[in-house]
Amino acid sequence: DIGPLGKAKNPFQSIEDVERDLEEMKSNPQLHLHNSYSAGSFLSPPVFGREYCGRSTELARLLEIPSRIEWLRISTSIRLQCVDDDSERGVNTAQRVEAVFVSGRGGSGKSHLVQKCGEFLSKQGWLVAGEKFQRGLEHNSQGVVCSLLDKLVKQLVRMKNGSVHKDVEYSNNVAKMLESSFDSSSLSSLMWYLPSIQNLIEGTNSVKRTSFVETNLTHWQLVFLVTRFVQSLLKMDRPIMLTLDDFQWADALTIDLVLGDILSSVFDQKKSDRFMFVGMYRDDEVFGEHPLSMKLSNLRQSGNANVTEIPLDGFSKRDITDMIATELKLPRRIVSELGDVVHKKTSGHILYAVKLLNSMVRDSTIYFDLKLCRFDWRWDKVCTLKTADGVADFIVSTFSKLEPEVLHSLRILSCLGFQCDFDVIELLDSSSVESFQGISSALQHLADVGIIEIAGGLVEFTHDLIQQHVYEGFELEQRKKLHLQIGLFLGWKTSAVNLLEGDFKKK
């Protein structure tokens, strides 16, 4: 079955193809197991994009940095153990802070790349937390940073309540360190911004948490609390990785807080061997006098940080082919032509490629062949696939297939931002406002076509590009009307609940 006379459906083209298959059998045996699909496999269609594929070079570059940090920790520890004179132990061993910036177009795979790195480091004992900024919510940028740090505290609370002795001991030590680092007034103010602290430190439940009005912190007071908190964590023995996505949508003060104050506090504390920061941003939105562009330039020149920049271009043909091979559980040789077509149609834009492949599954262009007992595809449909001008046009084209009621619900969701609590949606759905009714019933269909995801009590768009194009895809006046209706209803509902609670307390 080698060459044009081969009798197999997908004959080997050369002896090199045979060698490549043998190499794949060694590295990915699951792709070559005979009849590896069960009888009901075709009932569970493939979902592209859920498994991490490609970007091996970029991932290796990213993982080099925590490896360098671990080596620094070990070498510093050995050096200090060899120093007998206490005065020599005070020698400045500070290293530059590790700051990584992953850039690329929207949908180029920045988030997945960093998430993969974070998952690996979590298994190695690192504390890893991430947050993302949202378009149009620049005024809440500092709230995003506080949410990021509160996620660290929530991890510590889970460790405290867990069964692993070293985790329990570590979380208790962190709690003691925080108590010794803050006086009662500062701790009370910090609890407003990081509410999970009251679940970490015993006795703080009885402490009156300072109200927002009472706190009324200046920017510099907030800087003091946040940097002191980070410094306290770094006094312990576990390294920390903090990530912020869509950094281009942060306001100037917050960019300065993160890249200036927080990173400087790490450097000043001489704990660079326990900290790594990763920022992600769209490079087509950061240029000229953008605050992030200017701060990055200053950071490179400061000498306080090792700045690693990882730009992401389009996925290669091999990356696209590997993704198809992994999801369809087929050797690369069999899917290579399909991979070539998808790569040409999408120019290697991974979000576009994932959406295109999943649409091919939904319309049965990719299907399970019972005779072959594997997935196959209809070449006549593959070769006639229409090519959109870009990922935005492709996303918008999928909306035209939605029922008018579902599209209206989708527009309401886009007005609520990238992510929303399911309880808020149910509240809107239960209202007497006609335009809000039916949202909940549309969610499952929107999830089935890959527009939203529903998990953990949250409803979020599968990518912020989708939310952006839904939101910008209908008239401004209609947007204003929906925002007003949503605001008035939620405001009325909140006032009514507060009024009832006040009456109850009086009784």
Image (cartoon, rainbow, N blue to C red):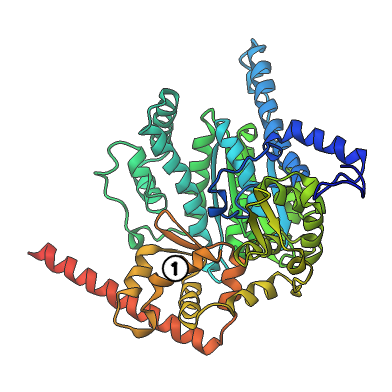
In the foreground, 282 or 341: 341
Is residue 34 visible in the rendered image? The answer is yes
For image coordinates 23% across by 70% down, the residue present is: 497
Q: Position of residue 107 (x, y in %)?
A: 67, 61
Q: Position of residue 89 (x, y in %)?
A: 63, 19
Callout 1 amino acid: Leu
Q: Position of residue 487 (x, y in %)?
A: 38, 78
Q: Quadrant of the C terminus?
A: bottom left
In the foreground, 117 or 229: 117
Relative to 76, is 22 above or below?
below
Q: Position of residue 80 (x, y in %)?
A: 65, 17
For image coordinates 39% across by 46% down, the residue present is: 186
Relative to 453, is 89 above or below?
above
Q: Mark 1 — residue? A: 443
For image coordinates 51% across by 57% down, the residue present is: 144
For image coordinates 58% across by 40% down, the residue present is: 119
In the foreground, 444 or 417: 444
